[in-house]
DNA sequence: TCTTGCGTTGACCGAAGGTCAAATAGAATT
DNA sequence: AATTCTATTTGACCTTCGGTCAACGCAAGA
């Protein structure tokens, strides 16, 4: 449990200039690709390194040559999967014009489609967030804080510039609230395992889902929205 | 990964009346007690069933007689640990009189003490929420939804009765928001692993923490508080 | 004392992560 | 082409650990 820190194995030789050999690099990518699928389909502990190797037609030892450990391999898989998610600021310009909260609503509405198109990445995200060891979770959190793969930082800045957000709150606070609630809301929306009863209590009624999203965005607006946007007549 | 469903091993014999034998029951309790410590100290995967047995002076096989699997043992440990947490409605009467949001503030202020007194349980809670397999996480979520060990339900009812909460929102929605944000906020407050930068960015400044709590409660008030309580002059 | 059966044991199994010396393939050199 | 040198791959092997099970011991009843 002490070795995830660097997921790159030492034996991966570097050239004088510090870049890894191209051949190595390519193989690493192939391994990660297959690993992502396995971890997504079976979860962390049930995914077998041997299976991954077998599917690639290589020896198990080879995988460990490129990634120090299973943890390390998963971490790489997680990073790659998360990178493929859209950033918040990638919403269509037309939506962005309507402000930060409309962007949120836009993404929540699209959540299910996004996941349907890319369920493997989403699954990895889940496994990384809830289904691994705490030691790995620490590493993941560090990554999320540092890399900001969803572009929260830009997004909050955007909201601040537009005057959509309260100015009496720390930006970090606003960002955290957004991250936390959006994450959990999406989890609940998508995975039965994590629904606290919001969506699957009385059967899956589609319009109920719409209503929930509406409520949720309104709620966020109250919490962190500026006075200017506050209760704008409950939707034009 | 298919066997957590019932954590009780079949061989735990029941008497005709359905109650377990008292001897068995006592031993189960002892095992769980030790298991809690081990899981808390080492995390899920690093905790060894053999060590737990050894510390109890019994054979490893005996543990599996009482709990179907390691998963099952952990689940029992988790349940017991979580039960020991205080319910929200256990705040002092004087605090309750001041309303729902003051109760929240009260608990947030006490979080650190609570955890210092009872860090083993808290650690188990963490491991259960972020550091196990997804399959187990599902079971845990079911348990949390069904048992409501923090008494969220009562607490929200309390808020509704007092008129502290908005009435245009579904109770489930309010409850979920509270659960989600309080949970994450406490996580960030307590464990470096999960802090998104709220508390450990510029060194641990105590008064900053106070300010954060203040901000956070105010934010919740805006989000889900009734008009009546809305912005009551920024603290008397 | 004999019988019955629950609870305990500890040797054993199999799965899976991880290691490493030897083999192989690829580039560089002559 | 032949040789040398090095990166990469291999697969047999090791270790750890969850989980099983046939045998055993012990307490209570007959």
Image: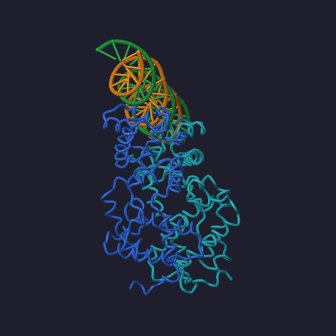
Chain colours: A blue, B cyan, C orange, D green
Confirm whether residue B113 shows in the render.
Answer: yes
The residue nearer to you, when weighing D26 against A156, is A156
B31 sits left or right of B2 in the view: right
Viewer-side residue, A198 vs B185:
B185
Q: Is residue A147 left or right of residue B121?
A: left
Classify residue A95 by image quadrant: bottom left
At x 51% / y 64%, what residue is drawn? A153
- Numbered circles on residues, count: 0
- Residue B12 drawn above or below residue A212: above
Give how far across and how far down residue B33 sits, in percent. Answer: 59, 48
State the image coordinates of residue A82 (x, y, percent, origin top left). 42, 54
Report the front residue among B115 and B139.
B115
- Identity of the residue drawn at 39% across and 46% down: B1
Q: Nearer the viewer, residue B149 or A3?
A: A3
Q: Where residue B120 appears, x then y in whole percent?
A: 61, 52
Up/down of A79 relative to D1, above or below:
below
> Residue B14: in sight, yes or no?
no
In this image, B58 relative to A203: left or right? right
Q: Position of residue B99 (x, y in %)?
A: 61, 79
Quarter of the image for the C terminus of chain B: give it.
bottom right
Q: Where, by quadrant of the figure, is residue C12 drawn?
A: top left
Q: In this rendering, is residue B118 above or below A13?
A: below
């Amino acid at each position: 449990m002490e070795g995830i820190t660097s997921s790159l194995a030492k034996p991966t030789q570097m050239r004088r200039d510090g870049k890894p050999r191209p051949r190595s690099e390519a193989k690493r990518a192939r391994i990660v690709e297959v690993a992502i699928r396995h971890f997504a389909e079976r979860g962390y502990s049930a995914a077998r390194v041997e299976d991954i190797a077998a599917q690639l037609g290589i020896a198990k030892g080879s995988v460990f040559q490129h990634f120090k450990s299973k943890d390390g391999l998963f971490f790489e898989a997680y990073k790659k999967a998360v990178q493929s998610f859209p950033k918040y600021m990638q919403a269509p310009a037309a939506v962005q014009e309507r402000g930060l909260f409309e962007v949120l609503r836009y993404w929540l509405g699209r959540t299910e489609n996004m996941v349907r198109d890319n369920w493997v990445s989403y699954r990895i995200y889940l496994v990384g967030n809830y289904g691994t060891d705490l030691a790995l979770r620490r590493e993941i959190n560090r990554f999320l804080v540092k890399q900001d793969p969803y572009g929260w930082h830009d997004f909050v800045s955007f909201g601040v510039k537009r005057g959509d957000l309260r100015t009496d709150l720390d930006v970090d606070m606003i960002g955290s609230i957004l991250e936390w609630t959006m994450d959990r809301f999406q989890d609940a929306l998508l995975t039965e395992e994590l629904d606290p009863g919001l969506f699957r209590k009385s059967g899956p009624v589609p319009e109920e889902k719409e209503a929930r999203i509406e409520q949720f965005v309104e709620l966020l607006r109250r919490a962190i929205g500026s006075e200017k946007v506050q209760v704008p007549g409950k939707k034009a």
